[in-house]
Amino acid sequence: MPSPLPPKQPWLSRLFPLLAIAFSLAAMSVPTMFTPGQPLIMPLLSGIMFMMGLSLEKADAARILADPRPVAVGVALQFLLMPILALTLAELFQLSAQLTFGMVLLGSCAGGTASNVICYLARGDVALSVSMTFASTLVGVVATPLLCQFYLSQQIDLDRLAMVISLVQIVFLPVTAGFMLRAGLPRLSAKLQPLLPSLSIVGILAVIAIVVALNAGQLGGLSALLIVAVVLHNLLGIVAGFLLSRLFGFDLRQSQTIAIEVGMQNSGLAAALSLQFFSATAALPAALFSIWHNVSGALLAGYWGRRRDSLQYLLADVETLKSDGA
């Protein structure tokens, strides 16, 4: 049985796409207004993950444990599709070697925590989204350097322990704490539920503004071909993730969640690794991706979130007709 839908979207979530664009433009125009907030990125993401945990129920965790196939398929699609798409687009648009390195590194990274927020706003399968982020980050400790070595023929050394510690701090501990609070104090968590979507939106908008501001200097040197390549990388990942998930037999809500997870990468990690192992030029794809995937994700979340109930009813009608026909 599918998990219950998250609460209907508040008015703030309907404005999320416009707000994401507005905050990005403001951060690019006046980066000094937002760059001091860099130390707040980790606490903000942890707070958002805590609210994700508050939205989960015991039935969600039990369902994931009972059927791990969506997580396994989603993670496999992410690490198989995104690096191949990145290299193909880089060669198609004849990007420079440094930009190609940055594209492939971005495609080889795990899913970002922003995808959990987008999934929540889209009223998707939050338990599946968080599980995929957690699993892909763990797998990425080994997969990211191996994929980069395979596609770029270069060895990249990663601080695996630091990545695991970061994952535990940003995702695992906050989500677990939120989940336990809801289980232990159901009345209190029930009162907090209506506030969670709006608080999540405020948090992710702050993160978007800070990340864009920190990369404002680099964003001025973007070429049109790179912009098109990054946009297509994200969109093709979403579309391919959705279509392939449906071919594997997953329901609409699971497929939409997997599509979001596959198409949204950990651009912050990709930018940091690009700067460390390649150059500032190689970090440009990740800097641009950090803006675009939040905007595209916000637009997608707004559309899918508004249509969630009608889609659910449509599927229910189809299933009823099939049953009647049988």
Image (tube, helix red, strand yellow):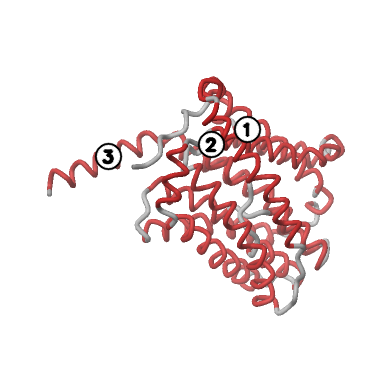
* Residue occupying the point 53% across, 36% down: 121
Residue position marked by numbered label 2 in the rendering: 121
Q: Residue furthest bottom?
A: 153
Badge 1 crowding class, 10 Å Cα cut-off, few under 14, some 14 to 19, many 20 or more, is: many
Q: Residue at x 33, y 42 (%)?
A: 1
| Left or right of 200 on screen, residue 245 | left
Residue at image point 82% right, 63% down: 276
Residues at badges 1 and 2 in contact (C-beta under 8 Å)? Answer: yes
Q: Residue at x 65, y 33 (%)?
A: 19
Q: Secondary structure at mark 1?
A: helix
Helix, strand or loop status at disc 2: helix
Task: Check residue 201 in the rendering and tell me which mark sits there, or answer none.
Answer: 1
Front residue of 85/264: it is: 264
- Write down the quadrant of residue 85 in the picture: bottom right
Q: Which of marks 2 and 3 precedes in the sequence? A: 2
Sequence-first tag of 1 and 2:
2
| Residue furthest front as drawn | 184
What distance separates the C-alpha of mark 3 from that of mark 1? 30 Å
SS under mark 3 = helix
Dot 3 corresponds to which residue? 316
The percent coordinates of residue 185 (x first, y second) are 55, 25
Q: Measure how far apart labels 1 and 2 are at the Cα level.
A: 8 Å
Which quarter of the figure has residue 143? bottom right
Describe residue 67's horizontal placement relative to residue 142 as left or right: left
Task: Left or right? Give the position of 58 relative to 143.
Answer: left
Between 302 and 187, the one nearer to me in the picture: 187
